[in-house]
Amino acid sequence: MIGIFDSGFGGLTVMKEYLKRYPQYDYMYLGDQANTPYGSHSPERVNKLVVQNVEFLIKKGCKLIIVACNTASADALRHVQQKYKGKPTILGVLVPAVEEALRSSKFGRIGVIGTRGTVISNAYERELKKYQKELYKLKGKRAEKNVRAIQKACPLLVPFVEEGMIKHVVTRMMLKNYLRPLRHANVDTLILGCTHYPLLQKEIERMMGRRVAVISSGKAAADAIEDYFKRHPEVEKGLFKKGKRTYYTTDSAEKFETLGSRFLGEKIKGEKVEI
Ligand code: DGL
């Protein structure tokens, strides 16, 4: 079974991408709605919550765990990967987004938008620098294209998206304001480093203009898993393929079902759990 978790229902935008490409697997989703938003917690708190979520999914029998939340990936992925040492395999969303951004960027001016926690962690910039070297080594080129990460925290977008104010004039004004420094910095690629932003992707693309490639971290993560399975067939072999889906939340199942269905684009049945 593939376990996917997030601080709430945002991670369902990531799950949606997995279901689109790989509907055959069994999935278990956990939304830690009781502790949302992770984006304004300290890294220590996020680490603690991530361990709890991972433990829960391990107990439920997940053999592969996807940390769908960008903030959790930024603050705690390394920690849980080291703690569980590949048993089970735990993957995040940052590295696939970074790899895709590096492949698509012409001038190495890469914008990143996310929660305050994600931006403060500087994880995207660190990974961009690290993978820049690897990518150019692979391509046989010198690492002459110096990558610059231009990051912007957009803390108000999450609540507005959750309120369903996707096309609202206030959301548009806010977006314009948040994206201004990125436009002024002439980014050629923009990473959507938050589970909620794919719901605003069209508007963001329109504001950034056609010359800017907009990359959704969740989509990049789902795209990358096929290649991961080729390199690690033993992980893929351990997964059940009955197309079963289970949804858990740590808070009200009703709210989870209403909002979750909107994020996933299909009706879901959630169950409240204590973890
Ligand atoms: N899931 C979070 C992320 O992708 C956004 C919501 C939150 O702050 O918990 O960073």
Image (cartoon, rainbow, N blue to C red):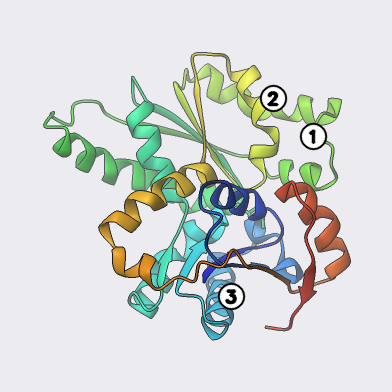
**Amino acid type at mark 2:** Glu
How would you rate the neighbour count of disc 1 (Cα within 10 Å): few for under 14, some for 14-19, many for 20 or more?
Answer: some
**Amino acid type for the residue under numbered disc 3:** Asn
Residue for point 50% across, 19% down: 212
What amino acid type is highlighted by mark number 1? Answer: Ile
Q: Earlier in the sequence, mark 2 or mark 3?
A: 3
Question: Looking at the image, is 270 positioned above or below residue 69?
Answer: below
Give the quadrant of residue 101.
top left
Q: Is residue 136 left or right of residue 195?
A: left
The percent position of residue 82, horizontal first and vertical second, equals: 34, 74
Kindly identify which residue carries mark 2: 203
Spot occupied by residue 183 in the image (x, y as percentages of width and height): 55, 19
Q: Find numbered disc 3 in the image and state the secondary structure of the residue it sits on.
A: helix
Asked if the residue at tag 1 contacts the one at tag 3, i.e. Cβ–Cβ closer than 8 Å, the answer is: no
Mark 1 residue element: loop
* Residue identifier under label 1: 166
Taking the view exactly as shown, the residue that stands out farthest to the top is 210
Up the image or down, 195 lies above or below 141; here it is: below
Q: Are marks 2 and 1 in contact (CB under 8 Å)?
A: yes
Which residue bears the numbered disc 3?
Answer: 53
Q: Quadrant of residue 88?
A: bottom left
- The image shows residue 12 at horizontal and vertical percentages of 66, 54
Q: Is mark 3 within 8 Å of ligand 1?
A: no
Quadrant position of residue 170? top right
In the displayed orientation, state which residue is furthest to the right: 254
Taking the spot 45% from the left edge, 74% from the top edge, the residue there is: 63
